[in-house]
Amino acid sequence: MFNSNFTSYDFIGDIHGNADVLVKLLNKLGYLKSNNIYSHPEARKAIFMGDLIDRGPKILEVLQIVKNMVDEGNAFTIIGNHEYNFICYFTVVEGKYLRAHSQKNNSGIRATLLALNNDLELIHYYVKWFRTLPIYLDTENFRVVHAQWKQPFINTLKEFGINDFSNTEFLSKSTVQNSPEYKFINCLLKGEEIKVTGVLFHDKDGTKREYYRLKWWKKGNNFKVDEILFDFPSEKNERSISSLGYPENNVPLFFGHYCLIDQQIILQNKNCCCLDYCISKGGKLIAYRFNGEKELNSENFIYENTID
Ligand SMILES: [Mn+2]
């Protein structure tokens, strides 16, 4: 699927239903629409980081644009945690939904259901497609995962021959808290979190929690908590945290998920690049134009802002 001699890829961050911005970005990148399908005149290919759905305002249009490109061989997309949640929400195993239809889960999925007109046939059409999307891409020239590249977990998935959610048993196990499958999927699609006892964080839903998302791409032994954890309150905390980072000699890695709103567009590392700048909250939709370089270059970012 990925020829090692072909390296003309445009990696595109989390879209979350922002079709108009996506179209502007595709145009800026030189993709042209014909017969309702975007393609690049120089045969470049787009690679999406997942999280196509939820939030809005044009989720169905995003799905159509991306799926048409993928079906035509003009693009690839991996799965994000939002597509994963969507699959689980609509999959019943032993008489139970794999993702509870709780008030919180219902509200997370509402925009997508509205966009799909609550049409069960259309919903299951996309569930079926999402279940074919790779969890990660591991090629000779680059890698892609939605949130975190954790080599031992990838290795185990490879041993089991699993790289999507087409297997219902695996899907089902991945929803059982503290199972190995849960641990792997939670890490690759949502990223590791570190528990800091006694320091409560009020997340966006107002829930208090002690877990903080780790800036796992940083490498070192003595990080202060506020250097390496997202949203850590500015209280004094003496604890130090070590992190393995992403190996310097590995091929460039692209990921999304971390919603880097109000942050400068920078590379996390010379071979490590987050492309999620939180388009649904007034941020940007970002692409990285790749041509096979081993060391990434921040001049290769191309982006579009939210359309008011
Ligand atoms: Mn995500």
Image (cartoon, grey):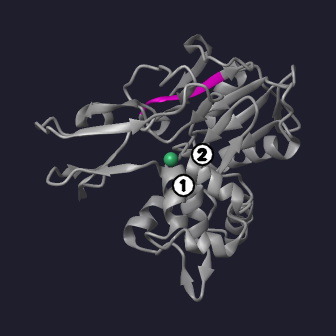
Q: From which residue to which does the magenta span run?
A: 282-288
**52 and 143: which is toward the camera:** 143
Q: Badge 1 local density, few (<14 within 10 Å), some, or many (20+)?
A: many
User: CB at mark 1 closer than 8 A to ligand 1?
Assistant: yes
Query: How far, Cα to Cα, is label 2 from label 1?
Result: 15 Å
Residue at 73 percent of width and 66 percent of height: 166
Q: Position of residue 154 (x, y in %)?
A: 62, 51
Q: Mark 2 and 1 residues: CB-CB less than 8 Å, in contact? A: no
Magenta span contains residue 284? yes
Which residue reaches farthest bottom? 95
Which image quadrant for residue 214? top left
Q: Residue at x 71, y 36 (%)?
A: 47
Tell me: residue 95, above or below residue 125: below
Q: Which residue is mark 1?
A: 82
Side (left or right) of 78 relative to 263: right
Amino acid type for the residue under numbered disc 1: His
